[in-house]
Amino acid sequence: MDINIGETLFIIVGAAISISVGELVSWFLVYRNAEYKDLVSRIETAVAKYNKEKESFVKETNAKNQEKRLAQIESQIKGLNYEMTFKKMISNAAVAILSIVTINSIGNYYSGIVVAKLPFEPFWILQQITHRGLNGEDLTDCSYIFIYILSALVFKTNIQKIFGLEGPKMPFGPGGPQPSLFKQ
């Protein structure tokens, strides 16, 4: 089966355009607002305060007071993070709708068309994505959706880094800090 590189490039460009428009929508709805910038500043201040408090943590003296202060700062960071998530919710919904429309549009045209040939046979979970909508038994054939997903992941990450749309870094994961972090 012949692979047309132009079709593959069209999918990659489509993903790049879709992600760029999605990030533009996010910038317009969220990132350019003064409220968002103030929230980022408050999060960064709280994270710096948390890191400073954590570095100066002493087990013996005033351990209870320090643990309480850390817990208060953690609570403040979690609240600010929740607020940030809420502010991004509408933007994320708009970007999701845009992505669904793009995937459907590309899918209508490329349904059943092999757009790439994989140099390996993917494991069974990945086969559901790489071979989606294709007829035939050759599992190295690749459908449009796999190329689109990979391209979208690469472009989204890079666009966010280039334009500074990543958001503030949290000192701990979504579940909060590890409880054994301070106890020994």
Image: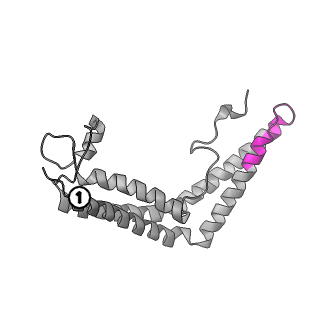
Residue 58 magenta = yes
Dot 1: element: helix
Q: Residue at x 34, y 53 (%)?
A: 149
Inspect the image, locate mark 1, and give the three-letter code of the amino acid beneath it: Ile
Query: Residue 37 appears at what percent x and percent y?
Result: 63, 67
Q: Quadrant of residue 108?
A: bottom left
**Mark 1 nearby-residue class (10 Å; few <14, some 14–19, many ≥20):** few
Q: Nearer the viewer, residue 138 or 36?
A: 138
- Residue at far right of view: 61
Residue 73, above or below 26? above
1 left or right of 14? left
Q: Residue 101 lies in what quarter of the image? A: bottom left
Q: Is residue 143 left or right of residue 35?
A: left
Task: Write the start and end of the magenta stretch as one range.
Answer: 50-66
Quarter occupied by the C terminus: top right
User: Which residue is the extreme one toward the top?
Assistant: 184
Q: Is residue 43 left or right of residue 33?
A: right
- In the rendered structure, the answer to whether residue 172 lies left or right of residue 117 reads right
Question: Is 160 in front, or is 12?
Answer: 12
Which quadrant holds residue 16?
A: bottom left
Front residue of 10 and 52: 10
Which percent across, then down, holds residue 86? 53, 60
Q: Which residue is mark 1?
A: 5
Q: Residue at x 48, y 67 (%)?
A: 26
Q: Provide residue 21's location: percent of width, then percent of height.
A: 40, 69
Looking at the image, how many numbered discs can be counted on the residues?
1
Magenta segment includes 141: no
Q: Residue at x 35, y 52 (%)?
A: 150
- Residue appearing at x 41%, y 67% in the figure: 20
